[in-house]
Image: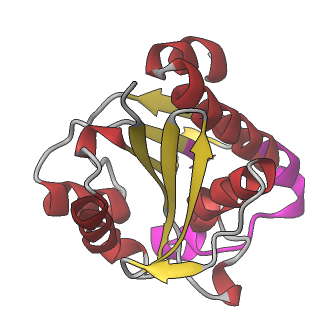
Amino acid sequence: MTDTKWLIAGLGNPGRKYELTWHNSGYQVLDLLSGRWQTAIDRIRYRSLTAVVRLGDTSCLLLKPLTYMNLSGEAIREALRYSQIDARHCLVIYDDIDLPVGKIRIRRSGGPGTHNGMRSILDALQHTDFPRIRIGIGPKPERWDLADYVLSKVPPDQEAAWRESLMRAADAVDTIIKEGLDTAISRCQAP
C-alpha cells in the first residue's frame, strides 16, 4: 500500500492583531483541525508554522504561512518542493468576499478571484489544478475599503455564522482526506 501525502494550507496573517479577523479564516480552520487531530501547529519550517499528522495511510502537512497573505505562494511552493507532495494534493483554505458569511464552497481548481493570497499561490505554482475550500466573509459593507474589511475583527452579530462555516470547512477537510473530494463536495457544502 502506498502512503498518500497532503499539504493542507490555511491562509492568514501572523500576529495577535490578526487573530480573529475575516482574513484569518484559513488559520482558524487549521486550529480546529489541530485540536481534532490532537497535534500542535508550532514547528517553524518552510517560512510557516507546521505540523505533521497521520490519518490512516495518509500523511498530512498542516501549514500556516508566516509570509503574510500576499506572499503565501512562496511558503507553499517551498513546502511542496521539500516535502515532495504533489501540488494536486495541496488543499488551500481561505476567506472569500464573494461568498456570504456562513457559506463554504469546495472546488477542484480555479482562478484566484479577488484574493491576493490565492493569486500569489497561482503565480508560485504556475497552475490551478489543486483543491480549495472558500469560506464566505461577504458582502463587504458598502462604505468599507476591501483591505480594511478583510482585516477587521468579525463582529459579534456575525460570529456564530462564521464559526459554523469554519466547523463545516474543517469537516470538509476531514472528508477530503478520508473519503475523497467528490464526497466532500456533495456532503459538506451548503446549497
| Residue 149 in magenta stretch | yes
Residue 137 seen = yes
Q: Quadrant of the N terminus?
A: top left
Q: Quadrant of residue 143?
A: bottom right
**Highlighted range, magenta:** 135-161
Q: Position of residue 69 (x, y in %)?
A: 42, 73
Q: Nearer the viewer, residue 61 or 158?
A: 61
- Indicate whether 132 appears above or below 17: above
Q: Quadrant of the C terminus?
A: top right
Residue 142 in sight in this render: no
- Say which residue appears at 32% left-offset and 72% top-offset: 75
Q: Please give the name of the residue rendered at 56% of the width and 83% of the height, measured from the top-left corner.
A: 14
Q: Is residue 188 magenta?
A: no
**Would you place residue 169 above or below residue 74 in this image?**
above
Q: Nearer the viewer, residue 177 or 31?
A: 177
- At 75% from the left and 64% from the top, the residue drawn is 154
Residue 58 on image: x %, y %: 50, 37
Q: Residue furthest front?
A: 1
Q: State left or right for residue 11 relative to residue 191.
A: left
Please report the residue visible at 78 percent of the width from the left and 56 percent of the height from the top: 38
* Scheme of colours in the image: secondary structure
The reply, left or right, for residue 110 in relation to residue 5 is left
Q: Is residue 141 left or right of residue 91?
A: right
Measured along the vertical axis of the image, is residue 102 above or below residue 19?
Answer: above
Q: Quadrant of residue 26?
A: bottom right
- In this rendered view, identify the residue nearer to me: 161 or 118: 118
Residue 62 screen position, x and y as percent: 53, 58
Drawn side of residue 111 relative to residue 61, left or right: left
Picture quadrant where residue 24 is located: bottom right
Place of residue 189 in the rendered image (x, y in percent of width and height, measured from the top left): 61, 23
Closer to us: 20 or 41: 41
Say how many tags the image has: 0
